[in-house]
Image: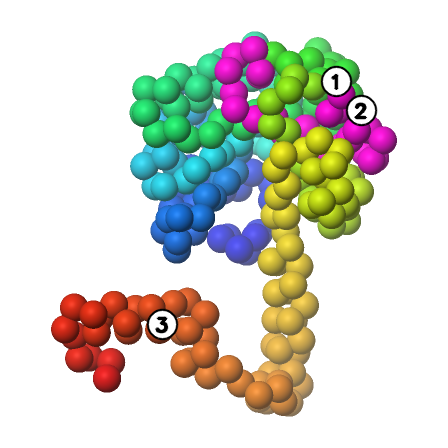
Amino acid sequence: MSRLGMADLGLTTFTDMHQNAAMIASIDPSVPVIADADTGYGGPINVAATVKAYARAGVAGLHIEDQVQEKRCGHLSGKLLVSREVFANRLRAACKARDESGSGIVIIARTDARAGQDPEGNGGYDEAVARLKMAAEIGVDGLFFEALQSKEEAEKAIADLPKIPVLLNEVGGGRTPIVTSEEANKMGFRITIWPTMGLEAVVPALEKAYAALKTKGKSPEDPAMGPGKLFEVCGLKDLMAFDESVGGKAYQ
């Protein structure tokens, strides 16, 4: 949505996702970034190339899923999955690339089986658990059970899954009930992500601002931040201080 202005229906390419992840990771390299790597963007060779490229870009961790290439948002209906064998090959390629790169990038296996089916009609809770158990045996660093349907199911998943870090995807209005990060931790999850929170905050504000421009011919009445304050959000003072520290006088 933020990159293309379009719905999450698998329209982004490796280039779109890699460039966006690299930009975010570069903002503050001391803060770990987990990035979505979708299906790995092809076969095992493509998956390996994706992992190594993300690692070189400074990404700390990524998740690879078991949807077909024509994928969609994890909280939409009608998801189609690849077979367990194809998913296993993706994960083996990702882990091998992690090890060969020496980067320590964290590989998280994501399954959409809870709300999807493979060509043989396999899907549902038990299939999701089986796929994540397989992923743990392959050697991934974390597990991502997408579209858990209730708090009770989330707790059951923690009990049923191998004892490696499990991620909880917190999407407001999605299939999984929202809990606080503290609650998730008590349930046994070790990572929580909030992937749409920023967009949900920004979109209504933008709609309001542009509606005001259309109807009134000017920006909203709220005091403008101005370029200075906007730039400060993006590190203006740090950049000026750096320039001064090496003898620069451009921003005096």
Q: Residue at x 62, y 86 (%)?
A: 222
Chain-order first, disc 3 or disc 1: 1
| x then y, percent, for residue 196 | 63, 51
**Residue bearing mark 1:** 160
Judging from the image, what secondary structure is the residue with disc 3 in?
helix
**Residue bearing mark 3:** 236
Near mark 3 (Cα within 10 A), the count class, few <14, some 14-19 or many ≥20, is: some
Quadrant of image for the C terminus:
bottom left
Residue 144 lies left or right of residue 86; in this view the side is: right
Magenta-tinted stretch: 135-159
Magenta stretch encompasses residue 137: yes
Q: Are marks 3 and 2 in contact (CB under 8 Å)?
A: no
Q: Residue at x 16, y 74 (%)?
A: 248
**Residue bearing mark 2:** 156
Residue type highlighted by circle 3: Leu
In the picture, the disc for residue 19 is: none
Judging from the image, what secondary structure is the residue with disc 2 in?
helix
Near mark 2 (Cα within 10 A), the count class, few <14, some 14-19 or many ≥20, is: few
Magenta stretch encompasses residue 154: yes
